[in-house]
Image (cartoon, rainbow, N blue to C red):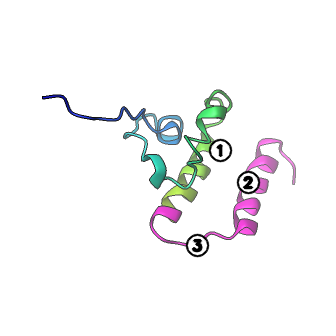
């Protein structure tokens, strides 16, 4: 009997941020847009685990039903970028 099982890769964010990963949640993920939107920048995330960790935190908050305002997300990223660039 042949089963119709869709192959799902490992979660890019979890893999980069935590070094291990579960299967990609697919369309249930807030970063899903006809495929994993972050897979397209995986090569850039690989060298920036702190960015992947922030995105993973946002994904988990959204999955838990918390509303994250765009401005709040922008502040988190700005802080991270400024910290990386050593800007006060």
Lower sequence index among marks 3 and 1: 1
Q: Residues within 10 Å of mark 1 (few under 14, many from 20)?
A: many
Q: What percent of the width, then of the height, locates residue 51?
A: 65, 44
Real-space Cα separation, disc 1 to disc 2, in angstroms: 8 Å
Closer-to-camera residue (80/46) = 46
Q: Nearer the viewer, mark 3 or mark 2?
A: 3
Give the residues in magenta.
62-88
Tag 2 residue: 77
Which quadrant does the C terminus fall into? bottom right
Q: Is residue 67 magenta?
A: yes
Specify which label sits upstream in the sequence, 1 or 2: 1
The residue at which mark 1 appears reads as 51
Marks 3 and 2 sit apart, C-alpha to C-alpha, by 17 Å
Q: Which residue is mark 3?
A: 67
User: Where residue 4 appears, x then y in whole percent?
Assistant: 27, 35
Quick check: 71 above or below 82? below
């Amino acid at each position: 009997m042949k089963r119709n099982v869709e192959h799902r890769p490992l979660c890019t964010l979890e893999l980069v941020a935590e070094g291990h990963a579960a299967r990609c949640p697919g369309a249930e993920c807030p970063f899903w847009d006809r495929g994993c939107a972050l897979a397209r920048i995986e090569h850039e995330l690989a060298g920036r685990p702190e960015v992947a960790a922030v995105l993973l935190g946002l994904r988990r908050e959204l999955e838990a039903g918390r509303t994250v305002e765009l401005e709040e997300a922008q502040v988190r990223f700005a802080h991270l970028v400024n910290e990386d660039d050593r800007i006060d």
